[in-house]
Amino acid sequence: MLRRLWDKCVNYETISYVICGFLTTAVDFVSYGFFRRMGFGVGASQAFSWLAAVLFAYVVNKWIVFRNYDVRPVHIAKEAGSFVAARVFSGAVTWLLMVGMVWLGGDRGFIFELFCKLMSSLANMILNYIFSKMWIFKKRTAVDGTQRD
């Protein structure tokens, strides 16, 4: 039973998702620093770095993680729209989780806030994976029974 669970959870898709998630975080942080050094304010830098990270995440999730190679403009428009909508939703959920946990925890210090940040980020990663796998990059079965994007 544990072997089946391991095989289900530890595979190319999940490992590449974690690696691409790490790289997406790096894009977010580096682009934030870039925009700040260019003289943008905190809010604008955060917004532009989030956008850069979401665009990067879309590309690597599409091509590397879920191996979806459909590049028809109508397909990309629908898929990218769904991806951004899901990221906005999961971002809002993550924000609510973070603020809620910190508020409920009271004044427990910075280490507690980091723990809350870690837990909300983990929830965000799981939510984004579920959206991507089940909705955005879902493999569809053609009439002849073959898999298609």
Image (tube, rainbow, N blue to C red):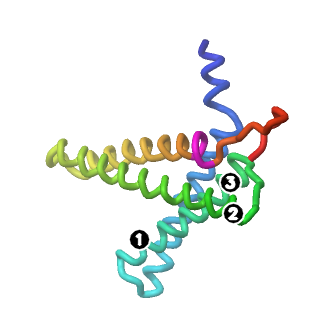
Residue with the mark numbered 3: 62
Q: Residues within 10 Å of mark 2 (few under 14, many from 20)?
A: few
Residue with the mark numbered 2: 74
Which residue appears at 58% of the width and 65% of the height?
55
Which residue appears at 23% of the width and 48% of the height?
102
Give the vertical position of 17 relative to 69 (above or below).
above
Horizontal side of residue 49 vs 16, given as left or right: left
Which residue appears at 54% of the width and 62% of the height?
54
Residue 94 in picture, x, y percent from top left: 37, 50
The disc, 2 or 3, on the residue closer to the chain's N-terminal end is: 3
Horizontal side of residue 107 vs 123, given as left or right: left
Cα separation between marks 2 and 3: 15 Å
- Nearer the observer, 148 or 100: 148
- Based on the picture, tell me whether residue 134 belongs to the magenta stretch: yes
Give the vertical position of 90 relative to 105 (above or below).
below
SS at mark 1 in the image: helix
Which one is closest to the eye, mark 3 or mark 1? 3
The magenta stretch spans which residues?
132-136
Residue with the mark numbered 1: 46
